[in-house]
Image (cartoon, helix red, strand yellow):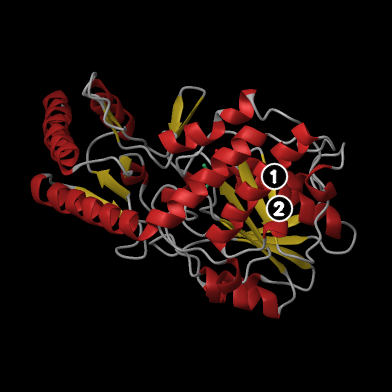
C-alpha cells in the first residue's frame, strides 16, 4: 500500500499522514450514498446514521479506555487541541489565568497558547531534557494557584519521545488542575488508557492512524467542563455544533478498531523495522546523531541529524529517488527555521538544521529500508563532497 510499486516510491512519512486502510474506505462508503441521513434527524434515515456514529464512538472509546459518552468528534487533532486549551481558558476566564505546557508541543497546542497570551493569559513553556522528555518535577514546580490547565503531549511527532504522562497526571490532579494530553501520535500505536494517564482531556486524529483526514476526537472526562468551541445546533450532546460527518466518524471508528486488534503485532514489526534502520544507518553512514530518547519512543519514528548537510537538500535528494521523509523545519518567507522541537533539545543550529525524520508504517518492508540506506549513503557522499569541493 505505501510502496507505490508502479512508480517505485517509498513512503517514510507516516507521522505526517497515513494512507487510509482499504477496510476503512469500505466501511465508510455506504454512508455517502445509502445511509446518508442526518444523524440528528428523528426519522429512520437519521437513526441509521446515528447508530453508525455511536458504534464508531464506542470503538474510539475502547481504544483509549474511555466511556463512549466522553468522546466528542472534531474536525481533527488541531481542533481537539484548540478546543481543549481555549475551551478550558474561557471556562476559567476571570478566575484563573495560567497554563503550563512544554516547548516541544505540536503547533496546534503552542500557537493556541500563544493566542491565549495575547488575550491576557499567562503561559509557562517548560523546557524538555535533551531527549525531549518533560520532567514531572518541572511540571510540579510550574503549577501556581492560578493555574487551570497543564497541556503536555504524550508522544512527540518529530522525535517520537514518550513523556511520563501518568506521573505528570498524578501531580496535576493532586493540585486540582485540568490535564490535557495531545495523544495524536500515540493513540493507536501504543497502549493509551485515559484512566492510567490521569488525563481530563485528550486529543486524537484519524489520518495519523490509517483513517480519513478531517476527523478526530476530543476525550472529555465525565464531569469535566470546558466552554464550547462551535456554537449552533445541539449536536454531540450539545457539546459541538455542526451536522455530524458520519462517514468520517465511521472511518475513524473502523481505524480505531483495526489499530486495537493489531496493536501488539504492529508495535513489534515497527520496533524491529526502525531498529533495523537505525542499525544500518549507524553502520553505513558517518557523522550522524540520533535525536530523541534511545528507548522511550514511539515505534516507527527515527530521527537523525546528519553532520555537514542541510536537511532540506537531503530531503529533496531523497524525494528525487522516490523516498518521502520529512524534516521539522518550517520554511517561512524564504528562510529555513530549524524545528522548535530540536532547538528545545538544545541541539546546535547546524545539527538542528540537518535532521531528518523517518516515520515508518504498517506496509514498509526491510527491502525499502535497505534501499533507503543505500540511497542516503550516496546522497550524503555527494552533498558532503560538494561542500568540501566548494571550500
Ligand atoms: C498531526 C498532529 C496534530 C494535528 O492533527 P490534525 O488532525 O492534522 O489536525 C496535532 N498534534 C500532533 C502531535 C500531531 O502529530
Residue for point 17% across, 52% down: 276
What residue is pinned by disc 2?
84
For residue 356, the mark is none
- Element class at badge 1: helix
* Tag 1 residue: 51
Quadrant for ligand 1 reads: top right
Res 197 seen here: yes
In the picture provided, is 63 more to the left or to the right than 345?
Answer: right
Q: Position of residue 61 (x, y in %)?
A: 61, 58
On the rendered structure, is 125 left or right of 191?
right
Q: Residue at x 57, y 49 (%)?
A: 204
Q: Residues within 10 Å of mark 2 (few under 14, many from 20)?
A: many
Q: Which residue of the protein is positioned furthest toward the front in this rendering?
A: 44
Compared to residue 265, the image places residue 285 above or below, namely: above
> Residue at 34% of width from left, 62% of height from top?
293
Going from N to C along the chain, the mark reached first, 2 or 1, is: 1
Please give left or right for residue 196 compared with residue 361 in the image. Answer: right
Can you give x and y, in whole percent of width and height, for residue 102 in the image?
57, 58
Q: Residue 336's spot in the image, x, y percent?
A: 43, 31
Residue 69: which quarter of the image? bottom right
| Up/down of 174 relative to 365, above or below | below
Amino acid at each position: 500500500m505505501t510502496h507505490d510499486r508502479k512508480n517505485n516510491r517509498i513512503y517514510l512519512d507516516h507521522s505526517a499522514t497515513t494512507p487510509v486502510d482499504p477496510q476503512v474506505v469500505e466501511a465508510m462508503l455506504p454512508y455517502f450514498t445509502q445511509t446518508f441521513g442526518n444523524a440528528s434527524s428523528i426519522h429512520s434515515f437519521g437513526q441509521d446514521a446515528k447508530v453508525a456514529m455511536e458504534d464508531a464512538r464506542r470503538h474510539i472509546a475502547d481504544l483509549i479506555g474511555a466511556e463512549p459518552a466522553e468522546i466528542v468528534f472534531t474536525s481533527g487533532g488541531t481542533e481537539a487541541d484548540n478546543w481543549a486549551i481555549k475551551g478550558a481558558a474561557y471556562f476559567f476566564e476571570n478566575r484563573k489565568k495560567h497554563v503550563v505546557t512544554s516547548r516541544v508541543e505540536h503547533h496546534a497546542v503552542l500557537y493556541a497558547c500563544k493566542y491565549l497570551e495575547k488575550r491576557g493569559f499567562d503561559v509557562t513553556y517548560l523546557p524538555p531534557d535533551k531527549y525531549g522528555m518533560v520532567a514531572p518535577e518541572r511540571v510540579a514546580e510550574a503549577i501556581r494557584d492560578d493555574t487551570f490547565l497543564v497541556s503536555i503531549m504524550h508522544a512527540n511527532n518529530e522525535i517520537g519521545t514518550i513523556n511520563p504522562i501518568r506521573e505528570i497526571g498524578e501531580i496535576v490532579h493532586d493540585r486540582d488542575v485540568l490535564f490535557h494530553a495531545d495523544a495524536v501520535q500515540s493513540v493507536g500505536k501504543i497502549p493509551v488508557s485515559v484512566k492510567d494517564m490521569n488525563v481530563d482531556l485528550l486529543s486524537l486524529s484519524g489520518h495519523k492512524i490509517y483513517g480519513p483526514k478531517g476527523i478526530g476526537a476530543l476525550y472529555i472526562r465525565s464531569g469535566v467542563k470546558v466552554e464550547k468551541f462551535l456554537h449552533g445546533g445541539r449536536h454531540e450532546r450539545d457539546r459541538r455544533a455542526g451536522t455530524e460527518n458520519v462517514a468520517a466518524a465511521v472511518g475513524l471508528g473502523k481505524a480505531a478498531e483495526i489499530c486495537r486488534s493489531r496493536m501488539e503485532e504492529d508495535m513489534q514489526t515497527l520496533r524491529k523495522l526502525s531498529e533495523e534502520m537505525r542499525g544500518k544507518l549507524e553502520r553505513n553512514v558517518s557523522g550522524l546523531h540520533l535525536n530523541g530518547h534511545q528507548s522511550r519512543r514511539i515505534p516507527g519514528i527515527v530521527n537523525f541529524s546528519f553532520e555537514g548537510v542541510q536537511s532540506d537538500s537531503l530531503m529533496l535528494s531523497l524525494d528525487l529517488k522516490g523516498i518521502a521523509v520529512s524534516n521539522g523545519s518550517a520554511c517561512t518567507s524564504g528562510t529555513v527555521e530549524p524545528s522548535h522541537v530540536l532547538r528545545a533539545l538544545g541541539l546546535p543550529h547546524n545539527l538542528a538544521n540537518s535532521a531528518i525524520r523517518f516515520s515508518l508504517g504498517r506496509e514498509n518492508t526491510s527491502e525499502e529500508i535497505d534501499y533507503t540506506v543505500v540511497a542516503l549513503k550516496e546522497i550524503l557522499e555527494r552533498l558532503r563532497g560538494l561542500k568540501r569541493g566548494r571550500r
